[in-house]
Amino acid sequence: MGNPVYAVAIAAATVFALAANVFPDALERLGVSKDWIREQPVSRARRAPVRITQPKSTSDCLNPSFGHAASLFHLFVKDTVASEGESVVHGRLAVGGAADLTGWSIGASIFPQPQTCAALSQARIYPYALTTGSTLTMSSGSVTNGHIGTNGAPSNTTKFQIGDAVQRGLVSRQCGVEDIADLEFDFSETQKEVEMISKKLFELEQTAWVGLERIAPPKMVIKLGGNVTEVAYMDAESLAVSKLVAVLSKPVRMTPGTTIIINIFGSPDIHLSGIDTSILTFPNKILWNFPEATNILFEDTDWYGTVLAPRAHVVLKSARLLGSLYTSSLTSTSSTLKPPAFDGCLPLGHLPSKLLLQRKRRAVPAFNAAAQATTTVTQTVTVTRTKACRMDPTPTIETGEMSERGEVHV
């Protein structure tokens, strides 16, 4: 007798939990207590360094957002890239160490249509879709816009194994494998700059409230504070058990002009699988900052927003990332990095000394296997300061229902 009774009780509890999540208002009208209908979200304490004091009115936006060199690239990896299947990088790619890019497609969205390297050079547009400082393996795949730039002699076949089809595609656009031993930037220094930006973002004052709502599907809920730039802190463990990242629609709605910086803390190893972040409607304004992480897995997910993880080894497994990725090393399996690039406001305009660079722009003529000439133009790049980013404190939060467009209504 005992087992059927327990089975009926469990089934009734399951049905009630489902109804409470889908029809909370109806249950409340029937007299069911709110405490029975829905659990309150859990707001976890932040374990982070001492926060710096931010201006309460305005602050400057960092421009370019990740330093002048790193901001050129859709994917910037300081060390190695390993490939376990075909992957796609729609923009430019930079790799500081050994790279296995067999089957990869690179550079398709730099321009709407493939351009010749001669045209890119005449326009003084950074011509390299790929930069590598060690060995390169690319037996198949394509580089749609720009040269393959290598830091070493391309004729050394033991270091650079590039397939015939890849070569033919390059030559058809008057491009080729270029030796760029005199790089326009230093990988190590650029990485230090990215790490510094990540660290400073992690010290910003919190302006947005974040809580974990446990009723299925579990979700991280963000309440905005009405600022141009919102700063939120999320516990990595809570994010890992979530299936949704939601934004409350009241009292402040998410708009195309709002930047959201989400600082992730609390665990060096993070496994993010099957999480729906598509309700963060404007990926070009979302920045996920992982300053403490050393290993991150994105698995079977569409991830909206740019990922800043300068100390981490990132694994993309059947993942699609809408934004840029800056990391220490990478393994990619059947994954895609798509636009848009981040163009939000990072309120770090007080860091100009580290972002004043002398950058050489190289105008490279059409690819010629016999002889190649280069012209060097020196350009001084400074930080552009733009007033924005109001940083105000936020009140506490109430729970609510999810709308069809992904916001939570209170």
Image (spheres, rainbow, N blue to C red):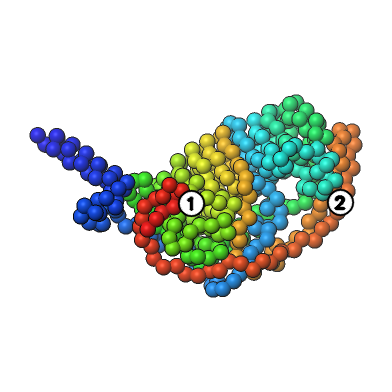
Q: How many marks?
A: 2
Q: Residues within 10 Å of mark 2 (few under 14, many from 20)?
A: few
Question: Where 59 falls versus 309 (above or below)?
Answer: below
Measure the alpha-carbon separation of dots 2 and 1: 42 Å
Q: Amino acid at mark 2?
A: Thr
Quadrant for residue 10, please give it.
Answer: top left
Mark 2 or mark 1, earlier in chain? 1
**Which residue is at the front of the view, 198 or 192?**
198
Spot occupied by residue 106 in the image (x, y as percentages of width and height): 68, 38
The picture places residue 176, in percent across and down from the top left corner, at: 80, 35
To which residue does mark 2 refer?
376
Residue 172 appears in which quarter of the rendering? top right
Tell me where residue 390 appears, x and y as whole percent: 56, 69
Q: 217 or 258, which lies in front?
A: 258
Task: Identify the residue position indicated by label 1 in the image.
Answer: 268
- SS under mark 1: loop
Furthest residue toward left: 1
Q: Quadrant of residue 243?
A: top left
Q: Are marks 2 and 1 in contact (CB under 8 Å)?
A: no
Q: Position of residue 50 (x, y in %)?
A: 50, 68
Q: Nearer the viewer, mark 2 or mark 1?
A: 2
Residue in the image at 85% along x and 46% along y: 122
The residue shown at (27%, 50%) is 26
- Please name whichever residue, 286 or 191, is drawn nearer the observer in this view of the structure: 286
Question: Quadrant where the N terminus lies?
Answer: top left
Q: Is residue 22 visible?
A: yes
Which quadrant holds the C terminus?
bottom left
The kind of residue tagged 1 is Pro
Residue under the image location 62 percent in, 47 percent down: 340
Q: Is residue 159 left or right of residue 400?
A: right
User: Is any part of residue 155 visible from this angle?
Assistant: no
Residue 374 placement, left or right of 324: right
